[in-house]
Amino acid sequence: MSPAFGVFAVVAVSVATLAIGSLGLRFSRTTSNFYVAARSVSPVLNASAIGGEYLSAASFLGIAGLVLAYGVDMLWYPVGWTAGYLVLLLFVAAPLRRSGAYTLPDFAELRLESNRARVVASPLVVLIGMLYLMPQFQGAGLTMHAVTGAPSWVGGVIVGVVVLFNVLSGGMRSITFVQAFQYWLKLTALLVPAAFLVLSWRNDGAPRLSPVGSRDWFDPAAGGYALYATYSLILATFLGTMGLPHVLVRFYTNPDGRAARRTTLAVLGLLGGFYLLPAIFGVLGRLYAADLVPSGRADTVVLALPSRMLGGSAGELLTALVTAGAFAAFLSTSSGLTVSVAGVISQDLLSRRLPGVRAFRAATVFAVAIPLLLAAASRGLAVASAVGLAFAVAASTFCPLLVLGIWWRGLTGRGAVVGLAVGGFLSGGAVIVTVLGERPSGWLGALLAQPAAWTVPAAFATMIGVSLATRRRMPPNVGRTMIRLHTPEQLDVDRGTYHP
């Protein structure tokens, strides 16, 4: 593709993002607007924004690349990411909104009446957010290099600058509009090229993949430690969704718990529709772009297929559209992650030194700069795999905290603190070895590469065991807090009145 088309696509989506984000400048003058958009976002708008935020570089580029490289077993990634919202709908969405918290550390302190729980939860939010931000910058660099030949750091810097402007100017209010727009842009950017590619495949005689010599691609869990890795991945993606800070913060923007449930239901439909598309690119890539695998460029298959299968102006225009969608993915997810990380840093580290909005803006710069450096240090890690590690940490820490905190009154502050520490230490250590170190071979390497199967049970068991051992340290107001989490907003428990 001509570099001019790629540059135009990146500039167009960046300008559109900045223009839509500037709408937030007219509304965002208070701390509430910056953190949770004044809790006034409708279910439809919020569902579109969550879809835009959740469908990251791993969804747009990584899934197709993994399917191309490793086979159909990699479809467990999108299945797990979508099904995770069902778990979120059933167990977390409405009670979490009723808690009235701004962030996950806010919820920990409210439920457990423990400042120590907040102190432990805050760095975990930052860790998960930065692990998730890192592959967004990786993907941006990969895309810019693939379509324009620019150095890989250029794409990450472009995304970082645009995200900084939007978040610094309008906080959550701005990025809500941006992310809603970007969901539909991403859907269009995959749907339209996929339709043309399928027509081209049919005109080419509809060739099929031959199972001869590619047994591992059709049945990739057949050997080695792949069966363990698959089940561990499923556990991480199913349970990790409810522990992702940038996902949970969006539920605080709903007016009430009923709106939070309706939002989650709409998100399931939006995600399910989108995730049908990357698999098409992965399978067609096996036919027309298999050479990308040995060269280590499998994540670029979505960008490469239009030119390879169609060629000419049509191929270049569709590649430009895909490039725009890819950058929309990087921008929308990075924006949500930056807000969630900056919110925690500003509240827990900077609030005593700076006023609310100024602290938020200072924290935003920090939240973008560190993942940019991490992305440069981990170029060899597949985009979707990097995101999977963030899910493993979230599943091993905040999932037990939320499930037990919302549904078991016996959870104590000490139990939660020790459980968060154990889950964070085990899963975080595995991630550090995987991202920055030399991973061991054999079973130990498999356990570190996909740690959720053993770190999640360890965190749950620790929280329950320590809570039972310290049951005399139950939060004094746990009964009132549990009623607040599970009682519809129309019922005023304190006054004994009902407001239909």
Image: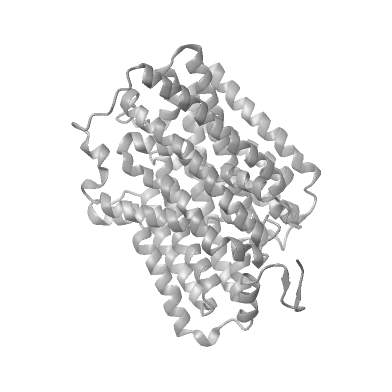
Query: In the rendered image, which quarter contains the C terminus?
Result: bottom right
Q: Residue 3: x, y in percent?
A: 52, 18
Taking the image as shown, residue 78 lies to the left or right of residue 40, namely left
Q: Residue 169: x, y in percent?
A: 73, 43
Q: With respect to residue 113, does 311 lie above or below?
A: above
Q: Residue 327: x, y in percent?
A: 56, 33
Location of residue 381 by image quarter:
top left
Q: Nearer the viewer, residue 46 or 122?
A: 46
Taking the image as shown, residue 429 lies to the left or right of residue 27, namely left
Location of residue 307 by image quarter:
top left
Q: Residue 279: x, y in percent?
A: 40, 36
Q: Nearer the viewer, residue 95 or 2?
A: 95
Q: Residue furthest front?
A: 500
Report the residue at 24% width, 56% height from top. Answer: 443
Location of residue 14 by image quarter:
top right
Q: Is residue 379 visible?
A: no
Q: With respect to residue 269, does 142 lie above or below?
A: above
